[in-house]
Image (cartoon, rainbow, N blue to C red):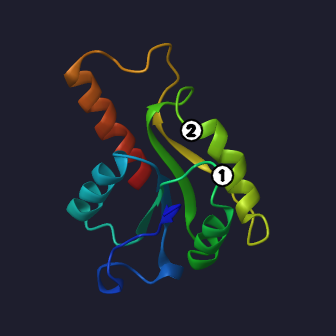
Amino acid sequence: HRYLPDAAPEMDTAPPDKARKLVLCSGKVYFDLLAEREARGATDVAIGRLEQISPFPHDHIQREAQKYPNAKIVWCQEEPKNAGAWFYVKPRIVTATRDVREVSVQFAGRKPTASTATGHGAVHAREQSALVNEALS
């Protein structure tokens, strides 16, 4: 699968036109986002997973923008801003959605840094919690 849409049952989430955010991500951060969304009861946030970033799933992202017409689109990643997929996916999300509506993609993740990880478990946990909170808030 190139893209996996939000798997929450319709009865567990708000109607798509009431969604406040569509959080797009790839990898393990999806499970952190899902767990926190459930803990908060944030039924107005949809979470989609890009399982294949290249070639980019333009068709799926366009359908998601149509499905969630009022949702802000957020890209969430665990990696620092300068190390993950952000600079690759941002222009492609904008291109995929341009025929549907104008989108300004927001970023939720770690600040740019020279290293890929903090090297300290407690700091990593705080940063992880902060980026998940930023994506869902």
Q: Visible in this render: residue 82?
A: yes
> Would you say 111 lies left or right of 133 here?
right
Distance, label 2 to label 1, CA atoms, is: 13 Å
| Residue at image coords 35%, 78% | 13
Element on which disc 1 rests: loop
Q: Which of the two discs, 2 and 1, sits closer to the camera?
A: 1
Residue at the (59%, 39%) spot, across then down: 86
Q: Residue 126, position in %: x, y?
A: 27, 31
Residue closest to the eye, 57 or 96: 57
- Residue ID at (43%, 67%): 46
Q: Is residue 49 left or right of residue 100?
A: left
**Which quadrant would the C terminus be assigned to in this image?**
bottom left
Question: In this rendering, is residue 72 above or below 52?
Answer: below
* Residue 10 to residue 6: above or below: below
Query: What kind of element bears circle 2?
Result: loop
Place residue 12 in its image quadrant.
bottom left
**Picture quadrant where residue 11 is located:** bottom left
Q: How dense is the environment of label 1, judged by Cα within 10 Å: few (below 14), some, or many (20 and up)?
A: few
Name the residue type under label 2: Ala
Q: Position of residue 43 (x, y in %)?
A: 34, 72
Q: Which residue is mark 1?
A: 55
**Image quarter of residue 93:** bottom right
User: Of label 2 and label 1, which has the lower sequence position?
Assistant: 1
For the question of whether residue 137 can be seen, the reply is no
- The residue nearer to you, when weighing 22 against 25, is 25
Q: Which mark is residue 43?
A: none
Q: Taking 78 as reference, is 64 above or below it?
A: below
Residue 38 x/y as whole percent = 24, 64
Q: Neighbour class for label 2 at 10 Å: few (<14), some, many (≥20)? A: some
- For mark 2, what is the residue? 85
Q: Residue at x 63, y 46 (%)?
A: 89
